[in-house]
Amino acid sequence: MDRNAKQLKTHLFKQRVWKESPNQAFTFYCPLCMASRRIPMHPKAGQPIHFVRIALLTLVFTLLTWEWFGPKGLVAFVPFWIIFEVLYRAKVRGALACKKCGFDPALYLVDTQKARVAVQEHWGDIAQSVKSKAPRSSLDSEESKP
């Protein structure tokens, strides 16, 4: 095997399509309308920066409430993390829904029928708003007169 073939082989193994980068925005395609989607955060909570932030919050909380809790205040990390996780997941779920077609992948995983109804309602709302914004033609106004 010559040197160029080895370099090419190692170069191909370094490039992975599925590698997730936690520092960048999460990009994907909507499975219904194939629109390129991007959410500004990683879909999974638990990145190293999240632990650091919650630890700093716990430290500040413990220092502010030292007279009441003492070192037991460090246990506040657990409820702070639970609150953070719930809010972060809600924020990610809200960002996942496609603005163009109304497809919500989180709802689709739970109940496909509800997801279909939600998409149909989205398109019905769009059709209704287009109808209300469309100018009325002269034929429509003549027909409505007695």
Image: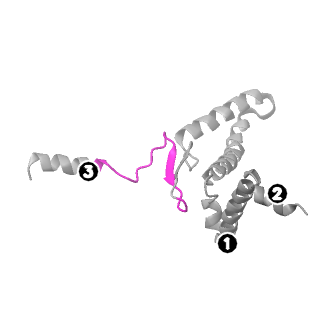
Count the marks: how many? 3
The location of residue 100, given as percent across then percent down, is 61, 54
* Span of residues in magenta: 12-33
The location of residue 48, given as percent across then percent down, is 53, 40
- Residue type of the residue flagged with mark 3: Leu
Q: Which of 10 and 52 is in front in this view?
A: 10
Q: Nearer the viewer, mark 1 or mark 2?
A: 2
Q: Nearer the viewer, residue 46 or 4?
A: 4
- Give the residue at the far left of this rendering: 2
Assign the C terminus to one quadrant of the image.
bottom right
**Which of pointers 3 and 1 lies earlier in the amino acid sequence?**
3
Viewed as shown, does residue 146 lie left or right of 18? right
Find residue 15 and name its label. none
**Which of pointers 2 and 3 lies earlier in the amino acid sequence?**
3
Q: Which of marks 3 and 1 is in front?
A: 1
Name the residue tied to disc 3: 12
The location of residue 22, given as percent across then percent down, is 49, 43
Name the residue tied to disc 1: 113
- Give the residue at the far bottom of this rendering: 113
| Cα distance between the residues tagged 3 and 1 | 42 Å
Instruction: Assign the magenta stretch its main secondary structure.
Output: loop
Element carrying mark 3: helix
At 8% from the left edge and 49% from the top edge, which residue is drawn?
2
